[in-house]
Image: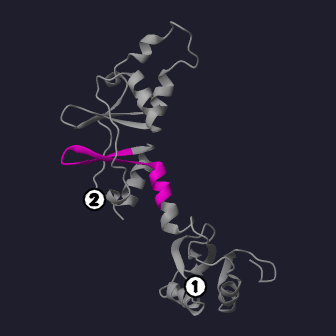
Amino acid sequence: MIIEEIMNRDVHSLAPSNTVKDAIKIMREKKIRHLPIVDEREKIVGIITAHDLKNILPSSIKEGSNLTTYETALEKIMVKNPLIGHPLDFVEEVALTLYESRISCLPIVSGGKLVGIVTTTDLLYTYIELTGANRPSSKIDIKVTDKPGILSDITEIFKKHNANVLSVLVYPSSNHEENKIVSVRVQMINPLSIIEDLRKEGFDVLWPNLPGVGPL
């Protein structure tokens, strides 16, 4: 999946000459937490987040005090030359960029112009959709030996039960380097019969650990 498929195209932005007051106003009205800052050519030159504003604003406001902060130009406090992405970047690459750089959003640029924005919330929602966690379903975690053909053996059992598999994730076991955890989300509320057959075939089902279906 590429970023173009999940990015927010309706991007609200401000100019470097706009003020802190302008940023607060548009964030509240649009219920957003990130504002790209663009010049007259629509080229991104900075970014402001709700966290940035919180850091410079007083914790309490008294009439007639600290008003100069609200009139501060964004160019004086914005993060300049922010990291950017491209619409054709892969979602996992952007997720890695956000994680490694410890940032919460990535402006998306094409042809030198701002065309979208992606936030950590967008990526989290995409993950939920891809795994099928937002649909009525059950998750089955199976510990397996890391060897060719093992995934095919597992899916054969699901096929036998005419179970609709929504997603399959494979990740390393935290206890044994030679093992993997296969996490299958199936569109079924009661997967007891599948769990029984998996265990009959010698698979170590870690979750769900149901009473009467064998130990972990």
Which one is in front, 69 or 172?
69
Query: Which of the marked residues, 1 or 2, is nearer the chain's N terminus?
Result: 2
The boundaries of the magenta stretch are: 106-126
Residue underneath mark 1: 163
Label 1 SS: loop
Residue 2 placed where, x, y %? 33, 61
Residue at far right of view: 212
Q: Is residue 61 magenta?
A: no
> Is 146 situated above or below 125?
below
> Is 137 situated above or below 153?
above
Residue 55 placed where, x, y %? 50, 25
Q: Using residue 9 as the reference point, say whether residue 184 is left or right of it.
A: right
Q: Using residue 182 as the reference point, say whether residue 101 is left or right of it.
A: left
Residue at far top of view: 64
Q: Choose top left, top right, bottom left or bottom right for residue 45.
A: top left
Q: Residue at x 38, y 16 (%)?
A: 71
Residue underneath mark 2: 88
> Is 197 situated above or below 24?
below
* Nearest-to-viewer mark from 1 and 2: 1
Check disc 2 and give the amino acid type: Leu
